[in-house]
Image (spheres, helix red, strand yellow):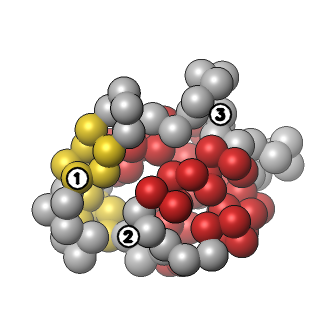
Amino acid sequence: MAIKNNAVRVTARSWDDEMTTEEFKVWLKSFDTNKDGRISRDELRRAIRSIRVRFSGWKSKRGVEYADSNGDGFIDDGEIDNLLEFAQKSLGLKIVAY
């Protein structure tokens, strides 16, 4: 299955297969619509919705709370690894480091 956004296309075989850490980061950053280098809750909601996960609003709130270590309400480059962990635990994505 391909994870698509207008600017970036990252390919994974299916949601049951693995994606690399780098593929996850590129895919996630493609949802940074205002290009401020941070992922907002709304941007995360759109990313979660794009993979057809139910309750995207609630899960995006939980994802930001989980990943946002400095408490500013956004996920920046230094916090993406926290979000990656959340995605594996709560969204069922299989992400591996290559």
Residue closer to the observer: 20 or 40: 40
Disc 2 residue type (three-letter): Leu
Disc 3 residue type (three-letter): Arg
Q: Is residue 60 left or right of residue 72?
A: left
Q: Residue furthest left?
A: 13
Q: Identify the residue at image location x=26%, y=43%.
A: 10
Q: Identify the residue at image location x=61%, y=67%.
A: 56
Q: Are marks 1 and 3 in contact (CB under 8 Å)?
A: no
Nearer the observer, disc 1 or disc 2?
1
Nearer the observer, disc 1 or disc 3?
1
Residue 5 falls in image quadrant:
top left
Quarter placement of the N terminus: bottom left
**Would you say residue 66 is visible in this rendering?**
no
| Numbered circle sitting on residue 93 | 2
CA separation in Å, label 1 and label 2: 14 Å
Q: Is residue 30 left or right of residue 35?
A: left
Q: Earlier in the sequence, mark 2 or mark 3?
A: 3
Disc 1 residue type (three-letter): Ala
Please state the horizontal and vertical placement of residue 83, each as a whole percent of the image.
57, 57
**Residue highlighted by disc 3:** 38
Q: Earlier in the sequence, mark 1 or mark 3?
A: 1
Please state the horizontal and vertical placement of residue 53, each as a whole percent of the image.
49, 72
**Residue highlighted by disc 1:** 2
SS for callout 1: strand
Residue closer to the observer: 61 or 19: 61
Q: Identify the residue at image location x=63%, y=45%.
A: 43
